[in-house]
Structures are given as C-alpha cells and as structure tokens.
Amino acid sequence: MGIIDKSRIYSPWLYHLHCGGCNGCDIETLAALAPRFDVERFGIQLVPSPRHADILLTTGCVPKQFIPMVKRIYEQVPEPKVVVAVGSCACGGSLFYDDAPDNYAILGHPDLLIPVDVYVPGCAPKPEAVINGVVQGILKLAEKRTKK
Amino acid sequence: MLDPVYTVLSLIIIVPLALFLGVIYSFLIRKLSARFQWRVGPMFRMYSDLKPLLGTTRLLQPLYDILKLYGKETIVPDVSRRRLFVYSPYLSLIFAVTAILFIPFPGMPLLSGVPYSLIIASYLLIASTLFSILGPVASGSPWAAIGARREVELFLVSELGFVLSIFAVAIARQSLVIWDIANGGQSIYLALLTVAAGVLMLVAMLGKLHIKPFDMPEAEAEIVAGPYTEYSGKLLGTYYLTKVFILYGLVALFISLFLPPLATSVLWLPLYLLAALVLVFLLTAVQVLNPRYRIKNAINWYLKVVIPLGILNLIIALAIWLVV
Ligand code: SF4
C-alpha cells in the first residue's frame, strides 16, 4: 500500500448531507463528532463543502423536492468516494415511506438515487454505530482504490 | 554566505525541513485547541489494537491530509476562469516557498544576507496571499467571492500591522537585511521595541493565518468553505501546503526579527524551537478563547489597536535610532 492510499485511510473527511430526516440522526451524528466521542482522534473531520469530502454521510429519506440536490451533491464529491447512510430512514425509508400508496412528498431512501456503500440502521443509531459505519466506509474507500 | 556550496545545500535542505516544521506547528495548533476544548485531538500514540490499521502516530496528520488530497480527483467548475483557477494555487505555493528561502534558520543563513532581504521576504509573503485570493475569485462561486472579499479587507488591515512592526525594527537596527537584524545584539531599549513590535506582529499574524477572531474568510457556518469552496483534490492540497509553508515562514520571520540571536547559530536551535512552540501556543490560545468577529468589527478593532501601537513603535524606533 502506497503512502497516498495510507493517508486516505488516515484522513477521511465527512460531508454531512441532511435530506429530510427528523433531525434525530443528525443529532447523533454531531454527537459522534463532539468532544465525548471525538473522531478527530483518527483524523476524521467534518468539512463544509462537498468538494473536499471523501465520505458522504446521508440521513433521512429524500423528499421529492430534494432529488436534484442529492444527485448534484453526490456528483460534486470527487472520486474515490463512499456514501454512508445513517438511520432507518436512509436505509429503507422507515416510517415515512410506504410503497403501496405513493407518498405525495417523499421519494424514499437515498439508495434510489445514489449508490450507497454502508448502511447504519437504527432510529436513531448511537454515535458508536455511526462511528462504526464511518470506519466500514473507510475500509471500502481503501478497497476501491486498490482495485483500480 | 561565503561558501556557495553550503548555501546551495542549505537551500535544498530547508524546503523539506520547513515542510516538516510547518506540519508539526499545524499539528500542535490542532492538538492544543482540541485539548483546550476537552477533546483528545489527533493522537500522539494510537491505541495499540488499532495500530495495524491506523498507524502508530498522527504527528504528521496535516501532511496526511495534504497527501490524501493529492490522491483525489480534481474538479474544475465550468463557470470558472480555467487558467487562473488552476495556476493560482501553484503560484501561491511557489511564492511561499521562495519567501522561506529568505528567512534564516539556526545554522543556515540561506539568502537572508542579500541586500533588502526583509523587503523581498515580505513582498513574497504578500504575493502568496494575493494568489490565494485571485484563485477563488476566478472560481465563479458566490461563496468564494464573499470569502475572497473578506480576505482582501482583512489583509489590508493586518498587512498594516505587519509592515509597521517590521519597519520599526528595521529603523531601530538600521538595516533592511534580515541576517543583519537577526545577528544584532540586544540592549534594554531594543528589548522594549521587541516587546512592542512583537505584539503588533503577533496581532498581524492572527489576521494572516486566519486565527479565530479573524477567521471570517473561512467562516464555515456562513459561507461554506469560503475561498476554497470550489477547490478540490490537488489544487486544494496545494493551498493547504501553502498554508503550512506560510505558518512556518511567519514563525521563522518573527523569531529572526524580534528575538535576535536565536536564528543565527546551530547552538541556538533548542531555544529557537522553544520560542516557536511558545509562539504556536500563544496563537492557539487566542484561537480557542475567541469567537469570530464580523468583518466590520475586525477592521475597527485592527485600526484601533494597530495604528496607535504602530505609531508607538515608530516613535520608539526613531528614538533608538537618533538617541541611542
Ligand atoms: S431514522 Fe429515526 S431518528 Fe433518524 S431521521 Fe429517521 S425517524 Fe429520525
């Protein structure tokens, strides 16, 4: 493994994409970044622009109004990238999503729009689970590169 | 200076050395601010069970960030002025690296003995900042434009403090050559000037390095990532590299101008490093103790603090020149 592949594992930067959740998952995600769990120990940082990110962390199920933004933000993240879906909403739609009668406002989980690599179920998942999901994402990130 | 071979060798050595020290300084800023905020921050020694995956130490964390950015895809937006957007980071880096060649390191005078090296070094540092403004302006993003505008405003006032402090020292020591200033002796009057001008330089450094009360160019709560919003991959990595070099350069310039004999002989190296650590600690303390100013307040504050302090400095410097 070269030094660049190593540094990819050493410094994954997160972009937090909130698309229509109830905010529960977002609070847990931010708790994972706050002093108690402090992921900066491992070099993980929250970045403000999707163009700087390695890992796209989505929460909530996508409202129909939000479809173009989700696609566009996904495209703005430079390769190699990994998408981590946090929460039951982002994994399968949870209580907002029901396929039988079409919901007028909600499309469903982000997997319908963009390829998701890691699912972190739970409503809302604990910060430990979020961190574990991010770590799985980092491992996938390393794998993606070595395959090329 | 007499031995050209040694000068060339030291010019080659200083670039990786400056990179290493700059990385250590920025690691310290991150680590110390984490400790101030009751966090752990990037780890000195990784937990033993995670060592195989995550490496033994994160002392070089800022360098890993930069290397990772070099391994990523670079996106150039369609609406940008392509040439300016792509070349600005590299020009900024080149100017920053050239500037550090004019600043002495213990045991290595480098080019600091050439005539007017003080002016050359400060111009090169300004040119580096100029290109870190031009690139974002060319990116065509409104966030970058707002960030760049704030950076220009901040730069105008912080540069005032920078120039006033370095020229007060130059007048008092009657030299525009960094090496001569760094070799000068100390006296009680010069020590007084060192304190006054050092405070002014520290205040100017806060603005130049975007330390907390003056980090509105990069205020991520309001304007995404500020000037760097549209930058990604290699180009962003180049800007981060520039920042590391500028951090090293400003610290080195501070020590060689205000703490005279420390930047001359190899024997001073431990004290030089100690002074650098204290300086980085001061910068971090300011960073964690302050919230962010609005740009208007920041400019007012700078004008209120820098102009009286600068005039005081010039009076002290003239008095030393004429009387002592
Ligand atoms: S998974 Fe639960 S906590 Fe998370 S956004 Fe959905 S409803 Fe809220």
Image (cartoon, helix red, strand yellow):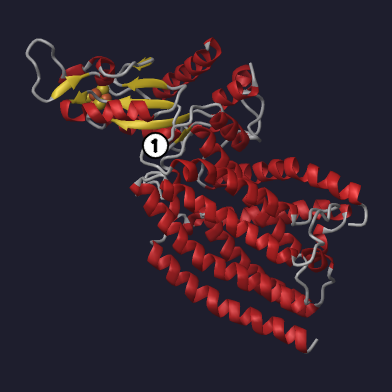
Image coordinates of residue A29 in percent, x first then y, are: 37, 30
Write the residue at 66% across / 68% down: B198
Residue under numbered circle 1: B77
Check the picture and name the quadrant holding the N terminus of chain B.
bottom right
Write the residue at 44% across / 65% down: B298
Write the residue at 64% across / 19% down: A2
Write the residue at 81% across / 53% down: B110
Category of crowding for the residue at label 1, using alpha-carbon neighbours closer than 10 angstroms: few (below 14), some (14–19), many (at least 20): some
Instruction: Give the chain letter at badge 1.
Output: B
Amino acid type of disc 1? Pro
- Quadrant of res A10: top right
Image coordinates of residue B84 in percent, x first then y, are: 48, 46
User: In the figure, B182 relative to B5: above or below?
Assistant: below
Q: Is residue B252 visible?
A: yes
Closest to the observer: B191 or B34? B191
Residue sitting farthest toward the right: B3
Check the picture and name the quadrant holding the C terminus of chain B.
bottom right
Q: Quadrant of ligand 1?
A: top left
Closest to the observer: B216 or B269? B216
- Quadrant of res B66: top right
